[in-house]
Image: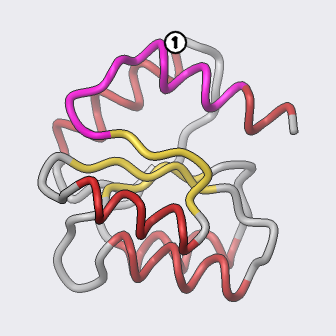
Amino acid sequence: MIDDQAAIRMLLRTVLENAGYTVREAASGQMALALYREQRPDLVITDLVMPEMTGLDLILEMTREFLDAKVIAMTGEISEEGLQTAKLLGARHTFHKPFSMDKLLTAIRYELAH
């Protein structure tokens, strides 16, 4: 999971670990890409608005390099158009913050099953 805000990472980590998932986290897109290349996770959840490398840039790079990358994008600061762009770049699901944790977990279960 990638988000530049530590509080968001901690919240998502808690929810995901309580649901039984193993979580690796990164505070930036560049760090996330390095971790992804090192050990490919089953699924990536990324914020779209981050310094240095945006989530859109990260999605583009990941899906270009790894065609089967599974990405869920989230944001609180970007328009619906930005979320649509994330889908065009390869995000399988998008969420606008704040979002329902139940809906996020449903999307995660779906992606991991397919």
Q: Quadrant of residue 70?
A: bottom right
From the viewer's perspective, tell me whether residue 95 is left or right of residue 106: left
From the viewer's perspective, tell me whether residue 9 is left or right of residue 101: left
Where is residue 14? Give x, y as percent: 39, 21
Residue lying at the far left of the rendered structure: 77
- In this view, the residue in front, 17 or 83, is 83
Q: Quadrant of residue 57?
A: bottom left
Examine the residues drawn in magenta and state their main secondary structure. helix
Residue 66, placed above or below residue 80: below
Task: Report the amino acid beneath label 1.
Answer: Asn
Query: Magenta stretch: residue 98 in it?
Result: yes
From the viewer's perspective, tell me whether residue 30 is left or right of residue 62: left
Where is residue 45? Give x, y as percent: 49, 49
From the viewer's perspective, tell me whether residue 93 is left or right of residue 83: right
Give the magenta-colored segment's residue range: 96-109
Residue lying at the far right of the rendered structure: 114
Please report the residue visible at 58 percent of the width from the left and 13 percent of the height from the top: 19
Residue 29, placed above or below residue 72: below
Please report the residue visible at 16 percent of the width from the left and 37 percent of the height from the top: 7
Please report the residue visible at 52 percent of the width from the left and 49 percent of the height from the top: 72
Where is residue 42? Give x, y as percent: 74, 49
What secondary structure is found at the residue carrying circle 1? helix
**In what quadrant of the picture does the C terminus appear?**
top right
The residue to which callout 1 is attached is 18
Please report the residue visible at 29 percent of the width from the left and 63 percent of the height from the top: 81
Where is residue 13? Give x, y as percent: 41, 31
Number of numbered discs: 1
> How was this image coloured?
secondary structure
Query: Magenta stretch: residue 36 in it?
Result: no
Q: For mark 1, does the 10 Å Cα neighbourhood hold few (<14), some (14 to 19), or many (20 or more) residues?
A: few
